[in-house]
Amino acid sequence: MKKNDVHARFVTIVNDHKEDFYRLAYSYVKNQEDALDIVQDSIKKALMSIDTIQNPHAIKSWFYKIVVRTALDFLRKHKRLTVADDGVIEFLSNGKEDDYENFDLQQALEDLPVQYKTVITLRYFEDLKMEEIAEIVDENISTVKTRIYRGLKLLRITLTEENKAHE
Amino acid sequence: MNEHLKRLKKEYKDVPIPVELDKIVASTLKPEKRKPRFVWSATAAAAAILFTATVNLSPAAAESMSKIPIVKEIVEVITFNEIKEENNHSSIDVKTPAISGLENKTLEDNLNQSYIDQSQKLYEEFTNSEGHLAIESDYKVMIETPELLSIQLSTFKAQASGYTENQYITIDKENEALVTLQSLFNNNQYLTAISENIKAQMTQQMEADDSKIYWIAEDDMDPFTKITADQSFYISKDRKLVISFNEYEVAPGYMGAVEFEIPTDVIESLLVGDRYVK
């Protein structure tokens, strides 16, 4: 694919999905102004490295990846990032089962370590495929599946067998 | 899908989309078709390259010429003019520097004309803006000795998010010549020597402070590998070489424009002499 085609394709994808990208950015920073900054920064960054795209069909995942990284860079900068190791996760998971009101569930999602929140957001809110998510977070598919499973467990959301089959 | 997830998804999708989104996305995607919002225009850059090429002296010539005593005017930087205006939620505050006292009038005029043109462009951008644009530009003398003068021109533009661009020129006042990065060195090995030192400094800074990020890892989108032959630089007050990067060049936007002082022992063997950098 020619360079101009890649560029044109990128522009189309950003325009078609700008609201999705904005919502994703917002889900990290919870603030309109910061979310707009992240979208803008991501586009600038993408335009600067658009020549490095190897697979023009993966532009959308590639840009999702930039948005996620830009958002995480932002959180790290503002010291608002929680990354927990597996030990902490196990500890948190052992709490008793609560009935969440919507607000609490929302809060629980916010409190989730960022690597779990990211995969859940991309999977269930952005409706991306497992392969795409793996690409975005730079992990293999089984790691992504494990993270989704653990994340849901932390949220005390149990999927029925039927749901699982649709994953 | 599970009921809980459905509710979460609904909340996620209910986040209101700000009206500015369309405009920000459109203007960021097509910076080259609109007025240059984030970069200096191609013409200004071309002009800068042109005069660098015409007036730059060879380092050897600079060394020998400096031994001839001549009585000269005082070479200095003055404020040529200042534009300050506000309207329609936009503001501009631009100081245009001018160099005076050089006998090499071609060099002086070229430099000054380039500064005037840049200010003019910023002013046009301001008058054509649809509002909510702030432009500031100011200059600073980084070093001034009987032989040397380094000037920083810093331009900040804010529209939704801010962007700062620093531009440097260094003049050999005695030889009346513009000093380029290349002219400081014997050969091209300086590119690698400086780049490696910068990467080491970046790694060290990131290890010491986890809020700092530079794009140097291989899995970064567009990692920094090497400085360019005409990389932006200046000479600091204590005669050290300082390499400067603009926003987004080697680090995320929040890091701003970053610079690295290169320890002289790293480049000593490659330097033409100690006339500029010590």
Image (cartoon, coloured by chain):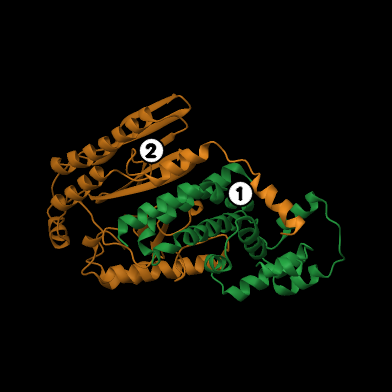
Chain colours: A green, B orange
Residue B3 is situated, as x and y percent measured from the top left of the image, at: 76, 56
Callout 2 secondary element: strand
Q: Chain of mark 2?
A: B
Badge 2: residue crowd in 10 Å (few <14, some 14–19, many ≥20): many
At a point 33% along the width and 56% down the height, the residue shown is: A5
Badge 1: residue crowd in 10 Å (few <14, some 14–19, many ≥20): many
Between A65 and A165, the one lying in front of the other is A165
Between B144 and B19, the one lying in front of the other is B19
Residue B173 is situated, as x and y percent measured from the top left of the image, at: 21, 48
Residue B194 in the image: above or below residue B96? below
Residue type at mark 2?
Ser
Residue type at mark 1?
Tyr
Residue A60 is situated, as x and y percent measured from the top left of the image, at: 48, 58
Between B139 and A117, the one lying in front of the other is A117
Left or right: B52 as drawn, with respect to A128: left
Q: How many marks?
A: 2
Query: Could you tell me if residue B160 is visible in this image?
Result: no
Left or right: B95 as drawn, with respect to A13: left
Pointer 1 residue: A26
Spatial separation of the CA atoms under disc 1 and disc 2? 32 Å
Query: Could you tell me if residue B220 is visible in this image?
Result: yes
Between B22 and A16, the one lying in front of the other is A16
Residue A164 is situated, as x and y percent measured from the top left of the image, at: 70, 69
Disc nearest the viewer among 1 and 2: 1
Q: Chain of mark 1?
A: A
Callout 1 secondary element: helix
Pointer 2 residue: B137
Residue B144 in the image: above or below residue B83? below
